[in-house]
Structures are given as C-alpha cells and as structure tokens.
C-alpha cells in the first residue's frame, strides 16, 4: 500500500505537468486542502489548482524531478525540484518538499515547503 501511495503522489505531479487538473482532482478527496509556506495559509485544492493554472500561463513547460521519497501508512514525504522554462528560453528551478496525507487511497492534504 505504501508503494502505491508513493506512486499516486508522483502521478499527481505528472498531472500538474500535463495541465491535467481534472486528473489531479480525481486523485484527491472532495475536501482536500493545500497549505504552502508562502504565508497565504490553507487553500482548497480547487483554489490551488487555479493558482497553479495561472502560474502555468507564464511558462512553456513545467517538470517535477523527484529527488527522494519516504512513505509510511497514509503519508508520503518527498523532496523534488520544480523545473520550468519560459518562452524566451529562460530556465529555472525551485527546490521543494511536499507532504501528502491520504484517506482511502486519495490525497486529503498537501503541504508544500519551498527552499531558496
């Protein structure tokens, strides 16, 4: 079960890369929440997906590189790098840690910590 949850966490990132917000939504509970360390507090998953969609309009491509992942019953913690490329060829990356909590095999909560 733990391996399956780790794969679901990765699948959620692949949905974001592809702009498949419906696919991401299907991996989550109806009441899923997202917290980010940017000081804006907790959001619903739908609010976060809207925010991510607006970010995606400023870049040509987004790719998550998984650095490492830890799983245990109903939880996944992973380190990753968010790579992006803009239309002008400018590239960048953001190191982050994400925590996923699952209920019934669906993502119930995501916590995101960005690293400078």
Image (cartoon, rainbow, N blue to C red):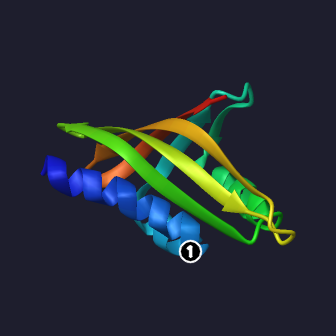
Q: Residue at x 47, y 44 (%)?
A: 80
Q: Position of residue 33 (x, y in %)?
A: 53, 42
Q: Residue furthest left?
A: 1
Residue nearest the viewer, comparing 1 with 65: 65
Q: Write down the residue under mark 1.
A: 18
Q: Position of residue 31 (x, y in %)?
A: 49, 49
**Residue 111 visible to an observer of this rendering:** no
State left or right for residue 13 relative to residue 69: right
**Residue 39 visible to an observer of this rendering:** yes
State left or right for residue 98 relative to residue 68: right
Residue nearest the viewer, comparing 52 with 47: 52
Which corner quadrant of the image does residue 7 belong to?
A: bottom left
Q: Residue at x 46, y 38 (%)?
A: 98
Would you place residue 86 above or below residue 51 in this image?
below
Q: Residue at x 56, y 67 (%)?
A: 17
Q: Position of residue 59 (x, y in %)?
A: 77, 65
State left or right for residue 66 relative to residue 38: left
Would you place residue 70 above or below residue 65 in this image?
above
């Amino acid at each position: 079960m733990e391996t399956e949850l780790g794969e679901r966490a990765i699948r959620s990132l692949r949905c974001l890369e592809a702009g498949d917000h419906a696919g991401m939504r299907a991996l989550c509970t109806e009441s899923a929440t997202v917290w980010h360390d940017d000081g804006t507090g907790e959001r619903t998953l739908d609010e976060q997906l809207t925010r991510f969609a607006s970010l995606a309009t400023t870049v040509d491509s987004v790719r998550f590189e998984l650095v490492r992942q830890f799983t245990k019953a109903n939880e996944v913690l992973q380190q990753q790098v968010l790579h992006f490329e803009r239309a002008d060829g400018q590239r960048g990356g953001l190191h982050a840690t994400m925590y996923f909590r699952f209920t019934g095999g669906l993502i119930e909560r995501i916590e995101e910590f960005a690293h400078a």
